[in-house]
Image (cartoon, coloured by chain):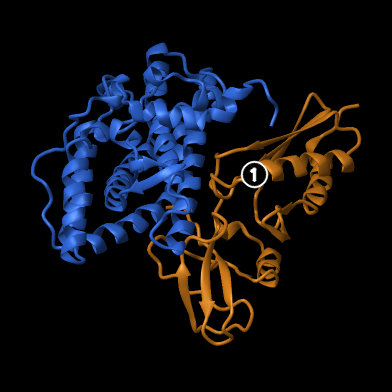
């Protein structure tokens, strides 16, 4: 099955499930790139500042591409989808909205680099698995977008993989800090790997592979990084103890992210840019 | 009067040669291989389809505006010029023309290798002195499409355009 454009969709159920998937993909990239932007000027060294902000900029571009696909489905403009949707309508995984650490960007940021490295590496690994699957999506515009994102994302994954394996196999203090964060991110990462309540339908419509297969591929990918670092991967599948973002559950951290991101937009929603 | 796309295609390309990437002002969007297709709607509206280079590139909006202005001033009968970024085909660094590669070098940016596949080693010669004795400083540079390198022969830092292939 192959659908070439939004106009070709006749099955309403297909359209609804496709939109659901696009919201998950777009919202994940959107909120994590916001958290990435909050590291600007605060990274461990200047080269990392350049690299991380470049990755973050690309990732925000990826979110825009998914929102544009939603725009074509009649869901509203990309700007509205990014800024004007209330918290309850967001479909991103909860672990991705969590603050980078204590304090705030404007108020003594005491962010945790280990948390950032673990969260970003796990996320980029999951994103790679999804993108590879999306390249065969029955919805051609999504498959095309996935190919375009995949070329850039290759560099992102490599970047975080280097940080992850090097810190995990570095000094005892680094390894300890990393392991604390591995444990923390692991217990909530199931949310990222989840395709939500419509997951089975997504696979049925051949929009993306099934959740179980994708999760297995992710475990294999991160497993090899743990092995390379000589570290032990937590046992069992990752959990979702803080709640399921795919079902619209979110924390106060997302409120803060959306308020900050939308501050200018909300001053005057009709302003021309 | 109706206009056919074949007749004006050359004119459009001529106009696009004047449109530069604002972050690499020595290279036109045609040399970069960003031009994909042009269509004429209702005989009066020109629709130009472009392939975006890097998705998060903030220059895309500026490029889009510059294309509209350039084509509009060159082709006076056009009632409207629309620019669309499409993903029907993926832009790769192989699309950069030989002229474009030369102009990149003149601007101090080493062009990407002609044939590149995922996982291939990426070796870059210095755009200033041609030496192969270079080191990678940061794969992520000041723009999404560029990396930062250093030439150990002429002791110049320089930038290189990242190889992008269909992965």
- Residue at figure coordinates x 37%, y 18% from the top left: A88
Return the residue nearer the eye: A136 or A248: A248
Residue A1 in sight in this render:
no
The x, y position of residue B16, in whole percent, is 77, 49
- Residue at figure coordinates x 35%, y 53% from the top left: A157
Is B16 displayed left or right of A10 in the figure?
right
The x, y position of residue A256, in whole percent, is 41, 29
Residue B127: quadrant of the picture: bottom right
The x, y position of residue B79, in whole percent, is 85, 28
Residue B76: quadrant of the picture: top right
Chain letter belonging to callout 1: B
Drawn colour of chain A? blue
Is B153 displayed left or right of A97 in the figure?
right
Return the residue nearer the eye: A209 or A183: A183
**B101 over B129 or under it: above or below:** above
Outermost residue toward the top in this view:
A12
- Residue at figure coordinates x 39%, y 18% from the top left: A89
Label 1, on which residue? B60
Outermost residue toward the front in this view:
A108
């Amino acid at each position: 099955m192959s659908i070439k454009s939004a106009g070709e969709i006749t099955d309403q159920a297909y359209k609804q499930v496709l939109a659901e998937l696009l919201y998950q993909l777009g919202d994940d990239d959107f909120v994590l790139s916001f958290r990435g932007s909050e590291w600007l000027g605060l990274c461990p060294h200047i080269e990392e500042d350049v690299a991380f902000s470049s990755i973050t900029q690309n990732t925000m571009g990826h979110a825009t591409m998914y929102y544009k696909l939603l725009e074509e489905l009649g869901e509203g403009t990309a700007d509205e989808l990014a800024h004007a949707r209330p918290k309850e309508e967001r479909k991103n995984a909860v672990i991705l909205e969590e603050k980078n650490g204590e304090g705030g960007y404007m108020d003594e940021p005491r962010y945790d680099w280990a948390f950032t490295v673990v969260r970003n590496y796990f996320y980029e690994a999951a994103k790679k698995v999804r993108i590879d699957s999306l390249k065969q999506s029955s919805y051609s515009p999504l498959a095309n977008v996935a190919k375009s994102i995949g070329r850039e994302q290759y560099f992102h994954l490599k970047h975080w993989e280097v940080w992850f394996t090097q810190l995990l196999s570095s000094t005892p203090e680094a390894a300890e800090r990393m392991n604390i964060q591995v444990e923390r991110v692991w217990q909530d990462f199931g949310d990222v790997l989840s395709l939500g309540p419509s997951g089975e339908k997504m696979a049925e419509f051949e929009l993306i592979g099934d959740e179980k297969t994708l999760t297995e591929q992710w475990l294999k990918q991160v497993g090899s990084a743990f092995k390379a670092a000589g570290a032990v991967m937590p046992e069992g599948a990752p959990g979702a103890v803080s709640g399921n973002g795919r079902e619209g559950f979110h924390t106060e951290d997302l409120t803060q992210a959306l308020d900050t991101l939308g501050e200018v937009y909300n001053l005057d929603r009709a302003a021309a840019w | 009067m109706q206009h056919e796309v074949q007749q004006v295609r050359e004119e459009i390309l001529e106009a696009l040669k004047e449109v530069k990437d604002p972050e690499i002002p020595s290279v036109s969007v045609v040399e970069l291989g960003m031009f994909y297709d042009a269509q004429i709607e209702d005989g009066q509206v020109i629709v130009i389809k472009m392939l975006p280079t890097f998705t998060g590139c903030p220059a895309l909006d500026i490029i889009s505006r510059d294309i509209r202005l350039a084509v509009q001033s060159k082709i006076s009968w056009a009632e409207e010029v629309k620019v669309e970024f499409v993903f029907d085909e993926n832009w790769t660094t192989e699309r950069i023309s030989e002229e474009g590669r030369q102009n990149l070098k003149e601007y101090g940016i080493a062009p990407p290798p002609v044939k590149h596949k995922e996982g291939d080693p990426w070796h870059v010669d210095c755009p200033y002195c041609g030496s192969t004795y270079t080191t990678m400083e940061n794969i992520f540079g000041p723009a999404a499409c560029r990396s930062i390198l250093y030439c150990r022969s002429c002791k110049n830092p320089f930038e290189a355009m990242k190889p992008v292939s269909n992965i």
